[in-house]
Image (cartoon, helix red, strand yellow):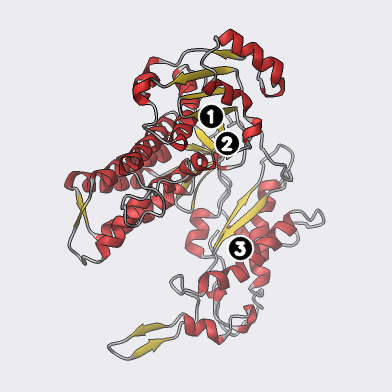
Amino acid sequence: MNIKPSLFQTNSRFHFVYETALRSTLQFEEEEIAVIMLCLTFGGKACPSEWGAASEIFCDLTNALLNDPSWDLEELYNPQSDELPEAASPMEGVELGQARELAIEVPVSDVGSTDVYIDDLFGFAADLPGTDNVRRLERACLLILHALARPKHPNEPIPRHPMASEDKFKAEAGATELKMVLGWLTDYRRLIVSLPHNKFVAWTNELQAIIDSRKAEAKQLEQNIGRLIHVAQILPEVYHFLNRLRCLFERAKKRGRRPIPVKDDCLADCRLLQLYIRRAHEGISMNSLVPQKPSIVYRSDSCPHGLGGYSSNGRAWRLYLPEWLLYRATNNLLEHIASIITVWIDIIEGRLQPEDCILSMTDSSTSEGWHKKTNFKTDPVKADCDFDPEEAEVRTEICRQFAELCVKNKLVHHVQWFAGKQNDVSDALSRDDDRSGEELTNLLYLHCPEQMPQHFKIAPLPQEILSWVT
């Protein structure tokens, strides 16, 4: 439901004092005119928090009313409730989506709940047989808005429209299983959020235009970065690959309207980001947007001459570098490669399903950070540490490779650091190259049984991964 802007006029009713009106002033320098807004604008820097001062109260009161069993919705309601569209179930007959177990405890209530973003209120309720949860949700929002805006007296001397935006009210306020929320198509029956088709086509084509022309203007880059930030709201991995585009945008601003050449590393990011846009269009499970318990946990480690890791399902591996590859990469880079290989094995061997939530655990805080960002320095002058341009390029390529694996297989990946003293199994896998798999397994069961999963077995790496590493 959308709240009419007149509710947020800059008056003392909601403590919007004159300073806010002045900060929202539109200035026309050439005409030497300043226009003071009597209604909070979206463009005013001070306005979002002022909007929230009222809309958050509105949301909290609605939630309180929903949980009040003494409220009789047939006796106390907003007259505008009679104009509500009927509740619709366009997905009738479609199988219900399955929620996964959360990693945290949250209060559970079937009476419904609401949330708010500036002037848009969103309500959710379980339509259970024998309850009026949905009807209560519809009427609660309107009743609170009616009360906050002061109900009109029958002899009101000043004409006033209802506070709920009427055009959007009739089109969007009805309860339904399929609804557009903040630019996303939300399917509450199958628990899926997706990017609308028109945005998918337009945004993909815009990135393709940059790829084909190998150049872009500042305004074009700014627009695409804004769109990708929108995608990152449900696919936060997108932030991982925006750094080079942001740097390119900063340089492009200095050229005015002249286009700036786009280098290969940015073009590679654009191609990967197209995959993320397609993934968002295909639909993301709402399970992916909440802290859920991981399906599989991975642990890995490395040393200068070897790598190793294993999963909570017991699949273990180890790789010892040939002499001609020794000391050609830092141990931090080897740690990062090991954390990727451990997941990649299960992808190749078919142990992971779409929407699986996986957790990679590493005792390298550097590798943990590389899973979350790739803003590696490429300028030796500006680098704040020992710099190797070849390794920086390799790190970026590795991160893209892993991101592509996750997005194509629809995986939800998280990473977490843990202390090295809890990583004895991976440590041994990466170092003990003088023992057979059976000997090493027996020793590990003897010395660190608490770290050993069931069905632990060391097996060779798939050929695809061996070829990629070497």
The residues tagged by marks 1 and 3 sit, at their Cα atoms, a distance apart of 63 Å
Quarter location, residue 59: bottom right
Task: Name the residue beneath numbered marker 3.
Answer: 80
Residue 364 at x, y percent in the picture: 54, 38
Q: Secondary structure at mark 3?
A: helix
Question: Quick one: label 3, few (<14), some, or many (20+) residues within 10 Å?
Answer: some
Q: Residues within 10 Å of mark 1 (few under 14, many from 20)?
A: many
The residue to which callout 2 is attached is 363
Nearest to the observer: residue 375 or residue 286: 375
* Spatial separation of the CA atoms under disc 1 and disc 2: 7 Å
**Residue type for callout 1:** Asp
Left or right position of 186 against 440:
left
SS for dot 2: loop
Where is residue 391, by image quadrant? top left
The residue closer to the viewer here, 175 or 464, is 464
Does residue 225 lie above or below 274 as drawn?
A: below
On the picture, is 358 further left or further right than 245? right
Residue 301: which disc?
Answer: 1
Mark 2, residues whose alpha carbon is within 10 Å: few (<14), some, or many (≥20)? many
User: What amino acid is found at the position of numbered circle 3 in the picture?
Assistant: Gln
Whichever of callouts 1 and 2 sits on the residue coming sooner in the sequence is 1
**Closer to the N terminus: mark 2 or mark 3?**
3
Do labels 1 and 2 touch, CB within 8 Å?
yes
- Identity of the residue drawn at 55% across and 55% down: 173
From the viewer's perspective, is the residue at label 2 or at label 3 nearer? 2
Point out the image quarter for the C terminus.
top left
Question: Toward the viewer: 228 or 422?
Answer: 422
Q: Percent x, y for residue 199? A: 35, 47
Q: Residue at 52% of width from left, 41% of height from top?
A: 368
Q: Residue at x 71, y 44 (%)?
A: 106
